Amino acid sequence: MAARSPDEYALVADGALTLTIDESCAPLTGTWIPTSARRVTAGSGLTPDASIVVVRGDEAPAPESPDAPSTLRIGRVRAWLDNQGGTALMIGSTGTFGQIDRLRHRARLEVRHRGGDAAAMDLQPMLTIAAAILLGRIGRILLHAGAVVAEDGRAWLVVGDARSGKSTTCISLAASGWALLSDDQVVLQVSQVGDLSVEGWLRPLHLDEGWGNRVPTGTRKTVATDAFGLRAERGPIELAGTLHTAVVPASRPL
């Protein structure tokens, strides 16, 4: 039987950033791949400005951690940026690692399957780091924020600290007739006419249990977007402004 070709996705609407995943690594991405990501078919002729490749790397030796403190850390993944060489190295707890060539706009992540669920916990933050760095290199920004589209067709960012109500605000506005772009990550870019636009990276929603009754329990659950019958859009859509969320003690959600 012939080996199956790797899965390839256009992560942004114009195909400027692509993700190619070895078939054996696909289950480890979980829900990281945005639901809006478009499958790229063989022979499509798409020429991306930046690319991420995920392969199985059980046989290859993992690089040693640099002696210097890491530049950033997400979960158990540490990353070192070499500004002079234009590269970045990411190392996870399972030996899964990634290398980013910031000058050539390419990233290669090698997954250790023997790590099981822990390997998935390494891969997903690495995908976020690689996407953020590469998008920055092609003039865009990956931002931890939600976004909704008002009735006038313009988008609003929903920003705030973790657990400050971004998802609740996005869903509440979408339930009132606005469209949902994302509750977690968005991509910002400057349009050809100089306006700032936003594209949503929509994934399953993370909500406090009891959200619908306005009595949150503090326990988070994952809910599919279509469970609420919300209207979703991808963008990019012109940005109108920002909405800032915050938790006020002894108050109830609106």
Image (cartoon, helix red, strand yellow):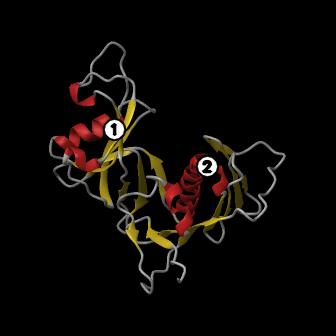
Q: Locate residue 143 relative to residue 156 in the image: left or right.
A: right
Local secondary structure at mark 2 = helix
Kindly indicate whether the residue at mark 2 contacts the one at mark 1 (C-beta within 8 angstroms).
no
Q: Locate residue 173 relative to residue 21 in the image: left or right.
A: left
Residue 180 percent location from the top left of the image: 27, 49
Q: Could you tell me how far apart the alpha carbons at marks 1 and 2 are, in whole angstroms?
A: 24 Å
| Residue 107 in view of the camera | yes
Q: Which mark is residue 62?
A: none
Which class describes the residues within 10 Å of circle 1: few (<14), some (14-19), or many (20+)?
Answer: many
Sequence-wise, which precedes: disc 1 or disc 2? 2
Residue 1 percent location from the top left of the image: 53, 83
Q: Which residue is most to the right?
A: 67
Which class describes the residues within 10 Å of circle 2: few (<14), some (14-19), or many (20+)?
Answer: many
Which residue in the protein does label 1 denote? 167
Specify the quadrant of the image occupied by residue 235: bottom left
Q: Nearer the viewer, residue 6 or 148?
A: 6
Task: Judge whether 121 appears above or below 172 on screen.
Answer: below
Q: Nearer the viewer, residue 67 or 54?
A: 54
Of badges 1 and 2, nearer the viewer stands 2
| Residue 149 in view of the camera | no
Local secondary structure at mark 1 = helix
Q: Nearer the viewer, residue 128 or 151?
A: 128
Task: Judge whether 16 appears above or below 43 on screen.
Answer: above
Q: Locate residue 141 relative to residue 82 in the image: left or right.
A: left
Instruction: Identify the amino acid type marked 1.
Output: Ser
Which residue in the protein does label 2 denote? 122
